[in-house]
Amino acid sequence: MNPDTIHVVEISSRKDLRKFVEFSFTLYSKNPYWTPPIINEEIDTLDQNKNPVFKNAKAHYFLAFKNNEIVGRIAVMINWIEVNELKKKKVRFGWFDVIDDIAVTAALMEKVHRIGLQNGMEFLEGPVGFSNIDKAGMLVDGFEESNTMITWYNAPYYITHFRKLGYQDLAVWVEYEIKLKSFDESPEKIKKFSHLMLERYQLNILDFKSKKEILPYVDKMFVLLEETYGNLQTFVPIKKHQIKQYKEKYFRYIHPQFIKCITNKDHELIAFCITMPSFTHALKKANGKMFPFGIFYLLKALYFNSKASFYLIGVHPQYQNKGITAIIFNEMQKTFNKYGYHIVETNPELEENSSIQNLWKNYEHRQHKKRLTVTQKLKKGVIS
């Protein structure tokens, strides 16, 4: 048997899932920009016995071997809500990592085509997770920038492989880094506009002192999230059992005062924003392990930091394009200044989302990353 032959093997045991997750640690061990996830959290996300998303999804995991060494990985997923309710016959792929060998990429993508066709799907998209709350997007610009807790990192050759294999771009996201001055030095027109909109629409800002105060609003935030993004071609409804899982996964990382909610005169939630202290440096020090010291690094980052990350913003459709994002950022600026934060990094924003990107123009900012998903109609015999 030729030792250079690529063997792609489907795996399912928790032991093999650990190998699946740890491959990226080997691949990027010498890359200073790669931010590692917490290994056990990643395994739990992929484990059908742990993640409630499998009530409405299925997944297959593959490892590629060459010369008896792991050289690539991929998750192939079908979200049945997307297929049955949204009528999108799409197979997803994610958790994609590979050495710089296009033959390995082709061999892994052949599995995506094969599983998609076996399940009656018509096209593929990736890299994405099970839903919109999961990580998504292949980095195509900003390779000398660290990924955040909620994004993937990848080498420049990934997109080169996909281009050569004939894949097309689908969704495109951009990310920004914004420098913060003091509130007194922040743009006057944002402050005045924010005050005007609060009075015009009789809105209320909710500030939280504890995680317990946030809990009554969590489910409402996810409802509002669907109302905000439901019309986007990338959105898939999130079920209650998934909300519980995301709450358990991310609630430990939340600083109460970094969450803002806005209600109308009838005390109905019309907007919210979730930001977090940046955990990038802490995750690098933890190197995938919560214990014995990883939890200490993460807790320290929660309360001693100078950089924040936007995670989620939701605005009810009736209040979109009415300056609500200006109100949110104006309020967050007060919190950032209070805790000595100098930089905030946005979550990936769809490139066409001009309303939010116009807001950043009022601040010193730079677009420092860009990522996308690729697509292709499913076909047999993608490997010659």
Image: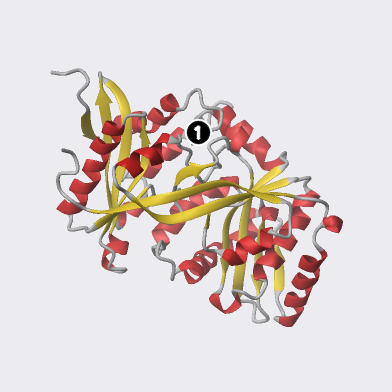
Left or right: where does residue 205 sit relative to residue 246?
right
Q: Estimate the x, y position of residue 339 in percent, counting from the top left.
A: 77, 47
Q: Nearer the viewer, residue 180 or 215?
A: 180
Q: Is residue 337 above or below residue 217?
A: above
Q: Which residue is mark 1?
A: 36
Left or right: where does residue 71 sit relative to residue 362?
left
Q: Quadrant of the C terminus?
A: top left
Q: Estimate the x, y position of residue 341 in percent, counting from the top left.
A: 75, 46
Q: Quadrant of residue 11?
A: top left
Q: Quadrant of residue 72?
A: top left
Q: Nearer the viewer, residue 230 or 382?
A: 382
Q: Is residue 142 above or below residue 235?
A: above
Q: Is residue 136 visible?
A: no
Q: As shown in the figure, which amino acid type bears the numbered disc 1?
A: Pro
Q: Residue at x 32, y 27 (%)?
A: 71
Q: Is residue 223 visible?
A: yes
Q: Estimate the x, y position of residue 235 in percent, counting from the top left.
A: 41, 63
Q: Residue furthest right?
A: 184
Q: Quadrant of the N terminus?
A: top left
Q: Secondary structure at mark 1?
A: loop
